[in-house]
Amino acid sequence: MEAIKVLPNKKEQTKSDELVQKERDKKILKVVEDIFQSYLRKKGHRSTPERLKVLREIYSSPEHLDADEIFMNLKLKKANVSRATVYNTLDILVECNLVSQNSFGHKHLHYERSYGYKKHHHIICENCGRVVEFTSPKIDQELSGICMKHGFKLKRNVLQLFGECIDDSCEGKND
Ligand SMILES: [Zn+2]
Ligand SMILES: [Zn+2]
Ligand SMILES: [Zn+2]
């Protein structure tokens, strides 16, 4: 069992860690905005403040939001971004690899930031919907290798594993 460590300045420690993360997030967002704007230009799309708001909304959260949640969050912030703009901006963001999408077995898609954040896959509980993220350089390497072998360069992938919690506290277990 792990011993309880008493750290006198744990609070400060956490706070400075948080600050470092915030600084990092800010830097990533700056880079991502540049990439997005040049991608829009390249593809002949207009770079509008509304599109950038969608991008910022996703990059300000570690969560897996669906399009309606993104739309509602923006609405709460009085950002004045239409649902149609949210949807078509999401498509472009996925296309240029700045945002990744997962269905988690739902009929809609969930979106999350990907540039500058650790590449990961998901395991979903079919009973309660719990989502766990995991990383596996081994799997990533294997997938790249498979693509290569078939004459492709892997650009993105969606790997979702469906299971059920072993824990009895899993809500929605129906036995
Ligand atoms: Zn969903
Ligand atoms: Zn569960
Ligand atoms: Zn994720």
Image (tube, rainbow, N blue to C red):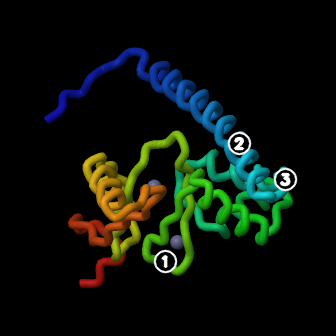
Residue where numbered disc 2 is placed: 33
Residue at point 59%, 35% (across, down):
25
Q: Earlier in the sequence, mark 3 or mark 1?
A: 3
Instruction: Indicate the quadrant containing the C terminus: top left, top right, bottom left or bottom right.
Output: bottom left
Report the side of 20 relative to 122 (left or right).
right
Residue where numbered disc 1 is placed: 106
In the image, 151 versus 93, the foreground residue is 151
Residue at point 67%, 43% (across, down):
35
Report the side of 149 relative to 18 (left or right).
left
Inspect the image, locate mark 3, and give the three-letter code of the amino acid beneath it. Thr
Where residue 4 appears, as percent x and y from the top left, is: 24, 27
Q: Is mark 1 on a helix, strand or loop?
A: loop
* Distance (Cα) linking label 3 and label 1: 30 Å
Residue farthest to the bottom, as pictured: 175
Residue where numbered disc 3 is placed: 48
* Distance (Cα) linking label 3 and label 2: 12 Å
Where residue 63 appears, as percent x and y from the top left, is: 53, 54
Q: Which of marks 3 and 2 is nearer the N terminus?
A: 2
Q: Earlier in the sequence, mark 1 or mark 2?
A: 2
Q: Is mark 3 on a helix, strand or loop?
A: loop
Inspect the image, locate mark 1, and give the three-letter code of the amino acid beneath it. His
The correct choice, above or below, for 57 with respect to 91 in the image is above
The correct choice, above or below, for 116 with respect to 53 in the image is above
Where residue 51 appears, as percent x and y from the top left, is: 78, 55
The correct choice, above or below, for 9 with respect to 87 in the image is above
Residue farthest to the left, as pictured: 1
Q: Which quadrant of the structure image shows residue 19?
A: top right
**Ligand 1 neighbours mark 1 (CB distance < 8 Å):** yes
